[in-house]
Image (cartoon, helix red, strand yellow):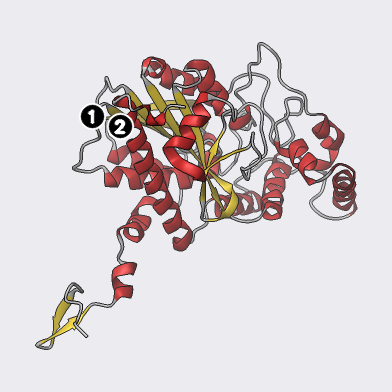
């Protein structure tokens, strides 16, 4: 049998010896990037981003600081032709500690972009840490206590009702995390599930509510600082005048461990959803069609882009990476909310530091295998997005419904 002369060899003691395949795999570009792309703290992640993009503009959150006294800001950088017809917008940190994953992906993409050119007519807009207070303090919500991805309803028209939430309101964040009060709340939740089903419970808990500032998944009474900042960023870069805008918003916590699900927040019958399917293929899922790991939710960022740009001229896709199971998520989110409703809210206390660590570990596992999967999938999405936008610049009707 002929030898495979393409395998790498090295000189050892005067003789040739082949390098092990395992060594090559462990030295892969993705694993190398894992070690440099992910960060342990907000100020480290922000420092890496600004160092890579010194032209970045900081939208500073006033009057608040991070756990180490650091400034909090949304950092924004444009890469490519300022007049580009098609723009990819990469967002991290909508849900606080999920920003560690999104920032890691952004850093990996920036490493890939060194010494190369973008396709003609295509530019990238990086938005790092859209919810900087939640990112720094490992809270899913903003400094106003709002879930930013429920905050984009049209408040002038009126926020949607969530009767399921109202029925369970006193039980979602009970006065204690154990003991009789906790067990009574759990029993009420089990009774609701028995009567209405698991999906109805998930809708009641997660779809969004606009009545209870102390409750989880609270969408707010008005646009948050982060929502207003996003609008300022989009208008400064004239995104509403571009031919096409593709928004990739990185999230974590739903789905299989390490897999990045591309969730279309568009209506299934919309032109934009059809474009998403043509650009990314059958990996795109839809809450509207029931194919997503996410239930339909209210007030998402998709509503903002829809109002700004319109159907058929933009995509909004949540790149959602699975971590741990739903029950684990419920436990860590309950502890986080309980701390602020019943526990005094001190995130520098012993319990506060424990909650912060648990939030960080749940939404961005410190596991190089998980992080490797994250970056590999992220590179796929970057490649597909750039390919699709390039076709858009060329009026390739293959992407049109």
Residue 230 in picture, x, y percent from top left: 47, 23
Q: Residue at x 62, y 54 (%)?
A: 354
Quarter of the N terminus within the rendering: bottom left
**Residue underneath mark 1:** 120
Q: Nearer the viewer, residue 81 or 7?
A: 7
Local secondary structure at mark 1: loop
**Residue underneath mark 2:** 390
CB of mark 1 within 8 Å of CB of mark 2? yes
Residue 162 in picture, x, y percent from top left: 78, 28
Q: Which of the 4 image quarters holds residue 216? A: top right
Q: Which of the 4 image quarters holds residue 16? A: bottom left
Q: Which one is earlier in the sequence, the residue at label 1 or at label 2?
A: 1
Q: From this viewpoint, is residue 278 visible?
A: yes
As drawn, which residue projects farthest toward the top? 156
Left or right: 121 as drawn, with respect to 144: left
Local secondary structure at mark 2: helix
Residue 48 in picture, x, y percent from top left: 34, 44
Give the crowd class for mark 2: few <14, some 14-19, many >=20 residues within 10 Å. Answer: many
Q: CA distance from mark 1 to mark 2?
A: 7 Å
Q: Nearer the viewer, residue 261 or 267?
A: 267
Give the crowd class for mark 1: few <14, some 14-19, many >=20 residues within 10 Å. Answer: some
Left or right: 21 as drawn, with respect to 209: left
Q: Is residue 195 above or below residue 322?
A: above
């Amino acid at each position: 049998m002929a030898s495979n002369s393409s395998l790498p060899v090295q000189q050892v003691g005067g003789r040739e010896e082949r390098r092990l395949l395992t060594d090559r795999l462990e030295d892969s570009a993705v694993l190398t990037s894992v070690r440099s792309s992910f960060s342990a703290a907000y100020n480290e992640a922000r420092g890496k981003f600004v160092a890579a993009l010194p032209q970045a503009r900081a939208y500073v959150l006033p009057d608040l600081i991070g756990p180490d006294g650091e400034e909090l800001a949304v950092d924004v950088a444009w890469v490519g032709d300022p007049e580009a017809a098609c723009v990819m917008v990469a967002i991290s940190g909508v849900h606080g500690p999920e920003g560690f994953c999104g920032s890691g992906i952004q850093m990996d993409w920036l490493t890939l972009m060194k010494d190369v050119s973008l396709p003609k007519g295509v530019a990238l807009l990086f938005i790092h840490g859209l919810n900087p207070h939640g990112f720094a303090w490992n809270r899913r919500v903003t400094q106003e206590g709002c879930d930013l991805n429920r905050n984009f309803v049209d408040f002038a028209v009126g926020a949607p009702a969530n009767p399921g939430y109202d029925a369970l309101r006193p039980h979602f964040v009970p006065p204690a995390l154990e003991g009789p009060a906790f067990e009574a709340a759990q029993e009420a939740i089990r009774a609701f599930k028995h009567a209405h089903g698991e999906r109805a419970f998930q809708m009641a808990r997660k779809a969004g509510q606009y009545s209870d500032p102390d409750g989880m998944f609270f969408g707010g009474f008005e646009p948050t600082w982060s929502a207003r900042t996003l609008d300022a960023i989009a208008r400064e870069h004239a995104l509403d005048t571009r031919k096409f805008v593709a928004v990739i918003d990185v999230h974590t916590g739903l789905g299989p461990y390490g897999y990045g699900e591309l969730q279309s927040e568009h209506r299934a019958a919309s032109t934009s959803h059809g474009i998403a399917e043509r650009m990314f293929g059958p990996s795109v899922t839809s809450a509207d069609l029931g194919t997503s790991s996410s239930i339909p939710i209210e007030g998402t960022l998709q509503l903002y882009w829809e109002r700004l740009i319109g159907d058929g001229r933009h995509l909004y896709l949540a790149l959602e990476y699975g971590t741990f199971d739903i029950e684990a998520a419920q436990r860590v989110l309950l502890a986080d909310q309980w701390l602020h409703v019943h526990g005094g809210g001190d995130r520098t206390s012993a319990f506060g530091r424990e909650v912060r660590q648990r939030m960080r570990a749940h939404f961005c596992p410190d596991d190089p295998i998980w992080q490797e999967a994250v970056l590999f999938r992220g590179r796929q999405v970057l490649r597909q997005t750039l390919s699709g936008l390039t076709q858009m610049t060329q009026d390739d009707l293959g992407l049109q419904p």
